[in-house]
Image (tube, grey):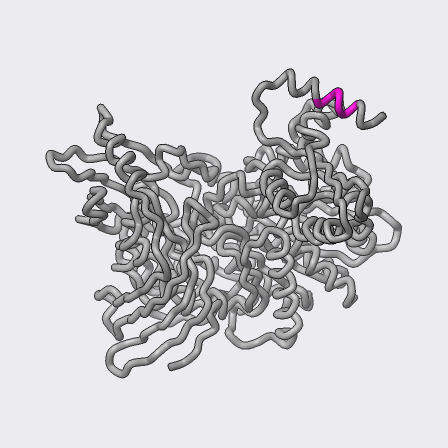
Amino acid sequence: MMYLLFFTLFIWIQEKHAFILPRDEVLWALPKTDKQAEDLQSFLNTTEVILWQPVVVENIQKDQEVHFYVSASNTNRIKAGLRQLTISHKVLMRDVQGLIEKQTLNDTANPRSSSSYYENYHSMTEIYHWMEEIVRVHSDLLEKIYIGSSYEKRPLYVLKLSKRQGNPKSAIWIDCGIHAREWISPAFCLWFIGHAIHLRERDQIMTTLLEHFDFYVMPVMNVDGYEYTWSKPSNRLWRKSRSSHSNSGCIGTDMNRNFDAHWCGHFPLSFHLSPVRRDQPCSRCKHLSGRGASPNECYETYCGPYPESEPEVKAVARFIRDHKDIIKAYITMHSYSQLVLFPYSYTTDKSKDHDELESLAKKAANAIRRTTKKIYTPGPGARTIYLAPGGSDDWAYDLGIKYSFTIELRDTGTYGFLLPSAQIRPTCIEALSAVREIARHVLQNL
Amino acid sequence: MAELPPTHGPASRAAALATAYISHRHGSPGHGWVLRDVRRARREDIDGIGHKYHLEFVLEDIFEKDSTVNCTAEVLYHLGNEKSAPDVQFTIEGELENTDEAHNAFYNRIQSLKKELEAENIPDSYGNVPPEMQPIRALAWAASGYVIWQNSTENTKYQLAQIKHVKQVKRTDEYLEFDYVILLHENVSQEIIPWQMTVLWHPQHGIEVTQNSCQPKHALD
């Protein structure tokens, strides 16, 4: 009966649209031999599909129908794979989003609740509206916590994702948007919340994680900088905050050098005494690198006048300090270069948990590789990229949050900070697999 | 010779430089190369001369993600003389795909334009590159490889971030000429550096950067 309905809908949609852009589909497959059933199991295990029938991959048997949901970006690849395995298959439902959108029309007049919402970049204003609305609609799971305000007096919010069960649980912190130009980072935090809200029933691991953990998710830490990158194209590659601490004419502090973890390293006095002015940047094209953080406010890695000088950093540090007994993992999202980093960044010395963190970073990178075949390189910050004092992950680690990671998302330079929105979805899917891997490990070691 | 962890900073910076150099030598309006993975890295300290990196790595095409090539390279950074560009020698395993046809098509399209081509912000803020601008971007990618090679040291890692502005310059000979202002991202200092470069290209003669210079930052405001 159900299929008849789908079939009718399918024909109706076909007639209505002579030309349809790729959309999410539900595919039907029928393995005819034990070998094919086995092939299909391992194929579906290594691809990003959502199984509808049977419930788990292990239950796939010969001569029994298999139904699964495939996102638009993957349909061609999945069909090619099935053809290669010579497993008979067809499209059960075309344009699933369209169906869902039609079915839930009353409740989704607003595009914020459609899945494609999370496949686009959004301005600061829009993200504030999104936070307000998602917390209102899902008040059973989400709470918006005000933790302070920015230099330009924008509110700073953390979303608490929690299945309320009375007892205070352990928690995992995820922050995004420390650096303004790394747009894929806030896109991940939005995706993460959207995934947890809409798909948690179909994601067994997520369901389990929510039984044991609360998540504190900060969608944008550098709200002023992020807003600035949206203001006009020439501001798109802004990195720092928007604060002013001197009359040099240079604005902004690198928030990821402003935490109180070996803040600003050590510099020769002469470096402090010879400020490079904003109007002579060519002199620094060749010889300013290798320091990791700079006491000069004209540089992109300016550490600020003192630790936590930035109100955003201060607010986050205070919140995490106040919750340090329940926060078991700290994860911060950056881009680009596809890395899974762990402490330390302020020294090339190994941390006392180096071996465990390294093995977990490797597991996270492997999870990504299984999910989208992308290569993420695991390693300690200072050795893998460069020495950088004052970073948030080192600070959280030294505070006592052992599982502290910086994930540098896509890509490796082809688009860099200007990652096309078509890559938001695969990037978030792979990053989510890394977060799940980290959370799973933390859960086993509580 | 010391074996280096291939994923660590020094190896990846040297490999990025080799990639820029290869992009310059083999880049064209149809191809650009980006570093995918460093497989092996060794460093040789040569007394009084400098540091020589021996590298094995994989490149992928900026247009076709599935198209990869294996490379080896030797990169020599001269000691105490940051003014001279590092020496780079490389080999590519196998043949690079022939794109003469695409090159000719691009050449003829630009030659037939009634008005000189002019564009800005490629990619735009959301990462979009209009299809007709892809060859213009690939050309900038190859040309920036030259600028990166000329200006790199052992402690820098440059990448083309964006074309701020490009304008075709009319010529009387058969070359195409483009005047670019690009933004380079230097990964260690995290600086975004505007750079002007004049680029000549012809399908038979390849790419030449005839002139280039670092620009003051406020020129963009």
Secondary structure mostly seen in magenta is: helix
**Image spot of residue A117 (x, y percent):** 62, 33
> Which quarter shows the C terminus of chain B?
top left
Residue A123 in the image, given as x and y percentages of width and height? 55, 35
Of A347 and A115, which appears nearest the observer? Answer: A115
Determine if residue A62 is in view: yes
**Where's residue B186, x and y in %?**
38, 56
Residue sitting at x 58%, y 19%: A18
Residue B150 horizontal side relative to residue B1, left or right: left
Q: Is residue A437 magenta?
A: no
Asked if A216 appears above or below A263 in the picture, the reply is above
Region of the chain picked out in magenta, as a range: A5-10
Residue sticking out furthest to the right:
A166
Disc tally is 0
Which residue occupies the foreground of this view, B65 or A277?
B65
Q: Is residue B11 left or right of residue A185?
A: left
Q: Nearer the viewer, residue A392 or A313?
A: A392
Please identify the residue farthest to the front as the structure is shown: A33
In this rendering, is residue B171 above or below B62? above
* Quadrant including the N terminus of chain B: bottom left
**Horizontal and vertical percent for residue B40?**
44, 71
What residue sits 25% from the left and 46% below the top?
B196
| x 83%, y 55%: residue | A168
Image quadrant in which you'd find residue A132: top right
Res. B221 in view: no
Which residue sits at x=42%, y=44%? B63
For this rendering, which residue is in front, A307 or A327? A327
Instruction: Give the side of residue B22 with respect to residue A142, left or right.
Output: left
